[in-house]
Image (cartoon, rainbow, N blue to C red):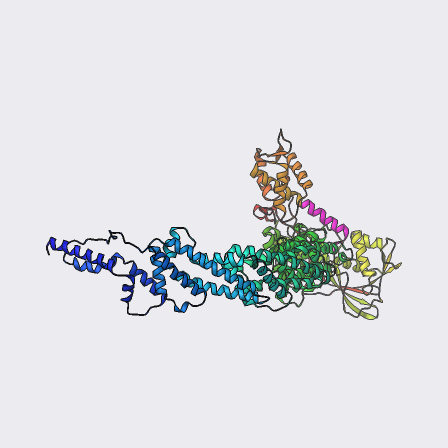
Amino acid sequence: MTEQAIKKRKRGTRDHFANTAESVTPATEASNFQIHINFGSYLKTLEILLHPSPICGSDYRRRGRMNTPKKRNFRIEAFKHRVEVDPKYAEKTWKVLEHAIHEIYNHNASGLSFEELYRNAYNMVLHKFGDKLYSGLVTTMAFHLKEISKSVEAAQGDLFLEELNKKWGEHNKALQMIRDILMYMDRTYVPTNNKTPVHELGLSLWREHIIHSENIRARLLNTLLEQMYKERTGEVINRGLMRNITKMLSDLGSSVYQEDFEKPFLEVSASFYSGESQQFIECCDCGEYLKKAERRLNEEMERVAHYLDPKSEPKITNVVEREMIANHMQRLVHMENSGLVNMLIDDKYEDMGRMYSLFRRVPIGLPTIRDVLTSHLREKGKQLVTDPERLRDPVDFVQRLLDEKDKHDKIISLAFNNDKTFLNALTSSFEYFINLSNRSPEFISLFVDDKLRKGLKGVSEEDVEIVLDKVMTLFRYLQEKDVFEKYYKQHLAKRLLSGKTISDDAERSLIVKLKTECGYQFTSKLEGMFTDMKTSQDTMQGFYASQHSDTGDGPALAVQVLTTGYWPTQPSAPCNLPAEILGVCEKFRAYYLGTHTGRRLSWQTNMGTADLKVTFGKNLKHELNVSTYQMCVLMLFNSADCLNYKEIELATEIPASDLKRCLQSLACVKGKNVLRKEPMSKDIAEEDAFYFNDKFTSKYYKVKIGTVAAQKDTEPETQETRQRVEEDRKPQVEAAIVRIMKSRRVLDHNNIVAEVTKQLQSRFLPNPVVIKKRIESLIEREFLERDKTDRKLYRYLACTTPWLQSLTPACENQNFIGHRNPPLPQPCVDVGHVDKMVHQSFPVGRGLFVLRHVSATIMQRAPRSNRPGQSTAKLSGRFD
């Protein structure tokens, strides 16, 4: 095809489109569609036909240029000549549209042609008559809304809301039809001229002429509030109608809902619940009041879910919480005979749980409950630990503490949702009142002693673990854990030496728990005690294996060899043992020292027992289990009928205090008085005389005399233990001071006290006065010095003397700061029970004591290199 032919075809194509656009009307194009479509789709299709895209001629152009070497794009230009419009066109077209709007509001829209109406509205906008169309729409809609307003105002009683809801529904339908007709105006004219869209315009006019009408606004609010009051007082209302009305207010804008309804609604609700709460609190107890408050709160949340805006829920619940809970919190928790304290005492878990769930909704609700709980716990605990009657029985004292702990644990679990703040309050309260008594560590140790001796006998392992875990809970509350360690070590030693423990597994389980809580150094010596018991068994087997031909008819002997560093040291005065056992004791000493070099043994006669076979009058025989001291006294009566106190003391050399207790148990205890005292009295005097009681009788063949059960220490023993604890704390405080100063080099007094307290609080709370004294001691020994300008500032002194340099680190690691020659622990040995019993008789005037079995205690002193507690590895880090 030639270039001239191509240009001719282009001109023909352009003329064809121009003539088509000029001669074809929208009605003609619309009539070309032979299918039926719905109204909305039709309007969109019509708009496409009225605005043909340049793409419409793409196929035609493509065919026209099929054989051209290069593809070119072209566009359809606007008409070059001006189209003349009928001057009355706008007025005529608007009359048609106005009539259609009237018909829509009058429910006669079925006869309208929406296609024609849309085309007319389109043409008005297209021909620049959008202002007339928009203003006419506003005027027409306002006219009909005024008529609707009159209709709503005329409705009476309950019909008011129904009429309003009905007219609102009709207005929305009419507004939808009008918006469809004026869709082109909504899309082009409205955004270009910054006008309100048709739908929003309809809502605005409804708000202005209906909702904000002088005769409707107040009436609508009062009617809504009246309906809600009826529902709150138990009447049934039309919730569907209420939902539609509140939805209408929300659709009109959040400001309409909030200002015209929500704000007054909240004010009226606050007044309602304020009066009701005052009425309830005057006539109900705390539990009943909480039930009513909970029910009201649930009702309001349900009301919001049914017919109010969801955003109103936090606001109305805040009103109920403020008026019914926050304003009466203090009165509720302290209400007489029904407040929180009474709930705690009477275990009212449901009421406490309800109080917790309600009070947690207000800002200071939970702290209020927590404060009352803490105050009650501290007061009750203080009464318990300061009651002299309770302190008489340590086991019952600790059991009551455990019962209180279990009770409040259950309360926090069931009622307070295991709230961590409440658990912390419980912990702080128990720490407060348990440490009010300086005997709490001793009593807890005695409780453990009682349980591991007999209290847990026959109990399953799971139950034993439960009891031990409860004990560990109380142990964690103690500030003076080192005091507990002292007592526990003494009681454990007595249990092991007397063989009274119910289970070695239970003993070891508790030690494992203590190790987990306090570290290896806390339990290293306790574990060493078990090691000594096992080693002693092997030693006795070796002894009897080597003496199988030389044992003769002497009494059987069982020895427990105990290392001093592990076992609690007790001063033991020498005692004259009967000649019957001196021989076998010397044999054991020779055997032990022959197999272990460099050790020194000392018999602990205050820690042993013996079994004696006795023949009383009428050939009545019994077997007595007595202490070593009692054995020494009774053996004297094999060669004498009567002995006075002075003679017994001279013959045995038993300390006076121990001898008097020994004679009291032998002569003054009913049912165990194998001796007779003259004159007869409870106290032992130096002038008293003692006789063998051949008239002694007992229904048991084996009689235990002087077996000491678990009981609290006497006052002198308590003071002595306290003094030992204070002495043990001094090197610990000094070690902590040196560790701190070595890392800081320079530090003021207050910071030293704070750091030392922080380091040692896991074992005890050091007294600031003690810390100050230890600092002075370290200054005297040139570990520290005061600053020359500031006397409250301390400096660490590095060691310069060679021998002191080698000594100082060891002393620091071993917690023996200040001791140029640190004291060395002393080993010990206990003479325990014997399996094989050998009988030997000694004739006495009217009685017969036969020594069957002796258990004794030996303290061993190991060589320096083998002593426990001397190596740096064992003691370093104990107080870290």
Q: Give the percent coordinates (x, y) of residue 691.
A: 85, 61
Q: 599 or 873: nearer the eye?
A: 873
| Magenta span includes 28 | no
Q: Is residue 804 above or below residue 378?
A: above
For the image, the number of numbered tags is: 0
Q: Give the percent coordinates (x, y) of residue 444.
A: 69, 56
Q: 716 or 532: nearer the eye?
A: 716
- The residue segment tinted magenta is 712-728
Q: Could one spot residue 131 in this view of the protein?
A: yes
The answer to whether residue 249 is left or right of residue 831 is: left
Quadrant of image for the N terminus: bottom left
Q: Could one spot residue 833 in this view of the protein?
A: no
- State which quadrant residue 420 falls in: bottom right
Q: 496 or 691: nearer the eye?
A: 496
Q: Give the percent coordinates (x, y) of residue 570.
A: 71, 51
Q: Main secondary structure of the magenta part?
A: helix
The residue depicted at 41 percent of the width and 67 percent of the height is 109
Q: Give the percent coordinates (x, y) of residue 768.
A: 67, 41
Q: Residue furthest right?
A: 679
